[in-house]
Image (cartoon, rainbow, N blue to C red):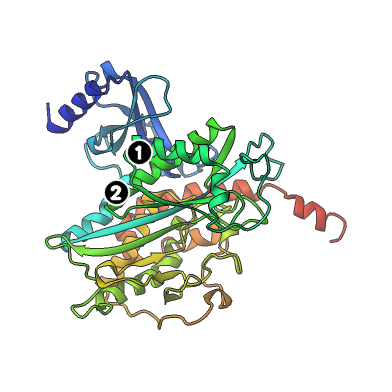
Amino acid sequence: MDTDTQAIKDWLKQHQISEVECLVPDITGNARGKFIPANQFLSRGEPRLPESIMIQTVTGEYSDEHWEFVEPTDADMILKPDAGTIRLVPWAREPTAQIIHDCFTMDGEAHPLATRNVLRKVLALYEDLGLTPVVAPEVEFYLVSKNLDPDNELTPPKGRSGRSESSRLSYSIDAVSEFEDFVEDMYEYAEAQELRVDALIHENGAAQMEINFEHGDPLSLADQVFTFKRTVRETAHKYSMYATFMAKPMQREPGSAMHIHQSLVRSDSGENIFADNKGAHSAAFLSYIAGLQKYTPQLISLYAPNVNSYRRLAPDISAPINLNWGLDNRTTAFRVPQSDAAATRVENRFPGADVNPYLAFAATLASGYLGMQKKLKPTRPHQGTANLDEVEVARTLEEGLRHLQDSPEVKEVFGELFLRAYAAVKLDEFEEFNRVISSWEREYLLLQV
């Protein structure tokens, strides 16, 4: 029995676990997998799942090119548990464990369509350079009243006062206190799962929250964001509410983002390479930002992966629409916060809260890596309000997907098969959405065109 297997066996016994959730993040970042009794988990061999689950759309459909990406026999893939991801499921009735699994082909190769493997590939590029990326995500979400009819607009839930929010309450302490029981349980669940969550604030929207994670290893943080989304939804259900990570769930409220702070340190010394020996921005840092500027148009569909995502990336609603960067400037896409040299970092403000965290981290780190490899030069730091400038990124999912394979170097990093499969899945979602006739069209076009 190898070390990881023994560690899992000991953990299950220590916590008297009766059931194990074998989890795999799918292309949307949601959990797929199996429930297995704990006494069978280690004795029945490695779990398997059909590899076709990796290329299902958000509606559960398959693209017409489905069989170009997986075996026509709908073959299995092998799941191997990552012992470092084992956690309790604090909302389960019986003692239950959750373990994130890595996906492998039947030949034992890392499965090219598994998004956790995509992030591992990018991290390996940095490992070869003797560098370690450090990230810190900030995840926004809304609490909303239960909505059983999708034709009805979402509304904020009632807080402990019995009233719903109706005004902008950024950073309000009292507004968070309206949902004190939810917040306390959310933190309790997070602590039970060893999620490294930090500050909670009330964001600009009605019943919109933001949770900040402590900085750390990108794969670990992606696992934590993946787990956190499940946690928040479960906590909200407990209080007869919904929690949503849609990028733009309500017409009159701002969107929800997952901003990613990122830096690079030398693996041997921990030195931040984004600052030189005088504390100024290093050439590597500037090339990293230039990489973000150059490759974001190609990778925008990984930051905005759903048809709804592009409602957030619009002028005048506090989300980036172009490729500017700036010093402590929240109107730019790439913000460099004020800090000492050791904490020098850049914040990518493009990703929405609806991203698959593994792919969003992979996209931003790959962009910076390519920028440094090619020694790219960024534009000058933007002065003033960047969102008054022209739109420079795609405004629809279909447009974003058309640019996904524009760059040979992006293909090499992500793998052509993965990019083609991702585009096929998301294009199918776009076409399905595009067949729906909206109330706006009936209101303004029915009798006037």
Q: Residue furthest right?
A: 447
Label 2 SS? helix
The residue lying at 28 percent from left, 53 percent from top is: 216
In percent of width and height, residue 389 lies at 56, 78
For label 1, the crowd category at 10 Å Cα-Cα, with few meaning under 14, some 14 to 19 and many 20 or more, is few
Dividing the picture into quadrants, the one containing residue 51 is: top left
Question: Does residue 354 appear left or right of residue 251 in this picture?
Answer: left
Q: Indicate which disc, 2 or 1, sits on the residue closer to the N terminus.
A: 1
Residue 254 is marked as none
- For mark 2, what is the residue? 219
The residue lying at 76 percent from left, 54 percent from top is: 440
Question: Does residue 276 appear left or right of residue 402 in this picture?
Answer: left
For label 2, the crowd category at 10 Å Cα-Cα, with few meaning under 14, some 14 to 19 and many 20 or more, is many
Most foreground residue, 52 or 272: 272
Looking at the image, residue 232 lies above or below residue 308: above
In percent of width and height, residue 48 lies at 31, 28
Query: Which amino acid type is shown beneath numbered disc 2?
Result: Leu
Dividing the picture into quadrants, the one containing residue 98 is: top left
Per the model, the C-alpha gap separating discs 2 and 1 is 19 Å
Label 1 SS? helix
Query: Which amino acid type is shown beneath numbered disc 1?
Result: Glu
The residue lying at 29 percent from left, 64 percent from top is: 263
Residue 71 visible (yes or no): no
Residue 439 visible (yes or no): yes
Residue 191 is marked as 1
Dividing the picture into quadrants, the one containing residue 447 is: bottom right
